[in-house]
Amino acid sequence: MVTILLNRYFLSTALLLLTLNIIAQPAETHQSIKDGQQEETSMLVIDVRTPAEWHTGHLDGAEHIEWQDIGEKIDQLTSNKHDNIYLYCRSGNRSGKAVKILQQQGYTNVFNAGGLDQARLLLERNIVSN
């Protein structure tokens, strides 16, 4: 019985530490975003989720380009490769892929704002729906 309790304790502790590590990572993104906001360039917020996800709610003032189309459609929003571009999706995975695509195209101030709720907090914007 004691062994089972100890195993549960160690497993719970390991899961807690893993969760804290995952939660701590956006703090670096948050700092990058705050640093990016200090520059004298335009700021774009782009939702890279699907149209169905976009219509359920998105950040106020955000543009919509699906992540796989970002490389071809970004020039519809900006031609300045130094603009601050903040990308978000549901969890941060697709926005991370979109960040890499834009960086490969020479965009210098591209940030993964994470998932919708995380981006809402970091960028201090409300969620709206059409």
Image (cartoon, rainbow, N blue to C red):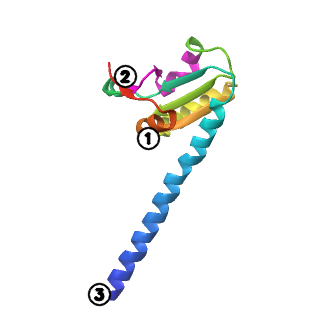
The residue nearer to you, when weighing 60 against 49, is 60
Earlier residue among tags 2 and 3: 3
Rendered location of residue 25, percent (x, y)? 55, 50
Q: Earlier in the sequence, mark 1 or mark 2?
A: 2
Q: Is residue 35 above or below residue 44?
A: below
- Left or right of residue 77, residue 55 in this image: left
Where residue 113 sits: x, y (%)?
52, 36
> The residue under label 1 is which amino acid type?
Ser
The residues colored magenta run 58-74
Verify CB contact (< 8 Å) between mark 2 and mark 3. Answer: no
Q: Is residue 11 left or right of residue 34?
A: left
> What amino acid is labelled 3 in the image?
Met
Q: Secondary structure at mark 3?
A: loop
Q: Quadrant of residue 100?
A: top right
Q: Are marks 1 and 3 in contact (CB under 8 Å)?
A: no
- Label 1 residue SS: loop
**Quick check: 68 left or right of 109?**
left
Measured in 3D between alpha carbons, the distance from the residue under mark 2 to the one under mark 3, in whole angstroms, is: 52 Å
Q: Residues within 10 Å of mark 1 (few under 14, many from 20)?
A: some
Quadrant location of the N terminus in the rendered image: bottom left
Indicate which disc residue 1 carries: 3
Q: Residue at x 58, y 42 (%)?
A: 29
Total marks placed: 3
**Residue type (three-letter) at the residue carrying disc 2:** Pro
Whole-Å distance between the Cαs marked 1 and 2? 16 Å
Rendering coords of residue 101 (x, y %): 60, 29
The residue singled out by tag 2 in the image is 51
Relative to residue 24, is residue 105 depicted above or below? above
> Which residue does the numbered mark 1 point to in the structure image?
91
